[in-house]
Amino acid sequence: MNGLPKGGSFLFQQTLPQDIFTPEDFSLEHKMIYRTAAGFVTDSVLTRMDELEAKQEGLNRELLQAAGELGLNGADIAEEYGGTEMDKISTTIIAECMGRSGSFAMTQGGQTGIGSMPIVMFGTHEQKQKYLPGIATGEIIGAYALTEPGAGSDALSAKTSAVLSSDGKYYLLNGTKQFITNSAMADIFIVYAKIDGDKFSAFIVEAASEGLSTGAEEKKMGIKGSSTRSVSFEDVKVPVENLLFTTGRGHIVAFNILNLGRYKLAANSLGNAKFALELAATYANERKQFGSPIAGFGLIKEKLAEMAMKIYVMESMVYRTGGLLENMMNSLDTSGEDGGQVAAQGIEEYALECSMNKVFATEALAYTVDEGVQIHGGYGFSAEYTIERLYRDARIYRIFEGTNEINRVLIPTTMLRRAAKGDFPLQEAFARLKETMASGSLSRDGEDGLVQAAKDIFLLTLDIALQKYGKELPKHQEILGKQADLAIQAFAMESAWLRAKKALAKEGEAQAKLKLTLAKAYIYATIGRLEYSAQEILAALAEGKELADNLENLHRLTRYTPQNTVALRREIAAAISENGRYVV
């Protein structure tokens, strides 16, 4: 990989602050794209949110075409096929800004992500030429039809069938897909079906095909402005040239698209969470109780600070990962006919980071909108206030693109699979940790020490779990879930701290002060929770003297001097209240 860090390698090696990308590294072009995308959402989408929520006919298509005129739909599409072909930081910025747009983020995300990326990455030249220019302009709307009523997260158990016609000119598709975004207005569907009952394959299916129909709109808790319907196929004829990639290789298409989808959903969550904090901070400054703005009350300060801390961490994770993806793309030769497949393989290297971003960001968003409602008090429960919609809209994020439970299982199992192939130095890392603990040279004071402690806690518990269960460990999902949380938090803590240190070196202490405070507060507030989670894992793996010895090793990894996080949060809250929004 030309010296690039391997996915998940942050757990086993030191990362230098200068080696990560942060929002402070935005170029002038990045800042211009930010202004363009944010301005579009503010001026064209939020001003029409009531119409969107009421499902005004044709409005989503109108907005997609307006986004297309600004180049926002074609960021991942090559110029040869009508796109604007931006770097991964730019596409991340667009996804973040779209996060503020409520249900339209799902419409636009379906268009630019799962509804078109299968063609971008796995389509033939002819398929790209036929469909991508219209997708970039918004004249062609795409949708992604994977989920089935009985399959859910088990996508490969799909029942939709495809049978080659006797003359070999087309496939006959039969089956039903459920919860399909953009289905009411889609012009094409990326459909997954099994050829001859067992060859899981992907197809481009035109909506005008005879035998294709959609059900009624789903009555949803949130994202009411986006179209979500079932799609049925009754002897739908799909020309053989509309087979995507290779017969029986549809899972390669599906899983690679999901990696990017998870990452972009994290960026959506970031934009959405910033919006929620802005609403909460503004309301807290204006709302008076007992003669004073509630922003001055200690428990409100704590909420505002905690929201800002989580946003800072997810922002650090998202753009760090964007930097990894961009560096990967720059290292690859994607000029050939199979360039999209080469890019997909490159992105797959960071599948772990994509899942970590997805889980952390969607749950941080859930926390942020929930506390946003709480700060609004009774008004937060009223549909007259925007925070109520954000609360409802956010709930689906933990379900989309593979549930957070699925992603939690994927994180450690992917690590174990890569370790078995020799791509992940687990055993060497276990041995080094044992040597370190035996030497008695552990020192965990300071943020660097606590970030390393988070990694070591993960390695200690995984080593003990593997000793007990070996290859049977994937059957113990409760342990896998907690292992995933330890790995996610190690990445979260490190991303926040590296960003703060990079800012300190570049900007000086005065300019970097708030970033340092945000990172410190998060690290010290989190490390104790990781220790408790590790205790639960260890108690599930051993008892008696063995458990006591394991707990002693854990305690040795987590000896540190607590910091005054109450004071740190007050500093953060003061900055948020003063500006009425998220600032760093």
Image (cartoon, rainbow, N blue to C red):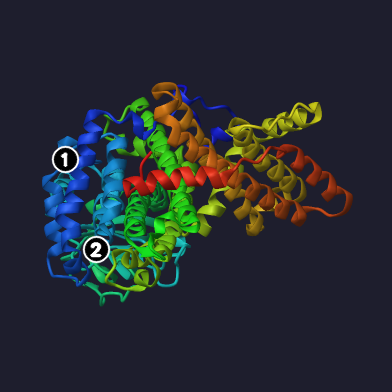
Image x and y of residue 572, in percent = 45, 44
Please indicate whether residue 125 sits to the left or right of residue 150 in the image.
left
Image position of 465 with respect to 400: above or below: above
Mark identifier at residue 81: 1
Q: Quadrant of residue 12?
A: top right
Q: Distance between the residues labelled 2 and 1?
A: 22 Å
Task: Identify which residue is drawn at 31% across, 42% down.
Answer: 92
- Which image quadrant: the N terminus? top left
Q: What element carries label 1?
A: helix
Amino acid type at circle 2 is: Asn
Task: Identify which residue is drawn at 65% across, 47% down.
Answer: 528
- Number of disc labels: 2
Image x and y of residue 159, in percent = 41, 68
Can you identify the residue that label 2 sits on? Answer: 182
Task: Identify which residue is drawn at 39% across, 68% down.
Answer: 148
Please indicate whether residue 580 sits to the left or right of residue 11 in the image.
left
Image x and y of residue 428, in percent = 68, 30
Q: Quadrant of residue 438?
A: top right
The reply to whether residue 400 is in sight is no
Q: Which of marks 2 and 1 is nearer the N terminus?
A: 1
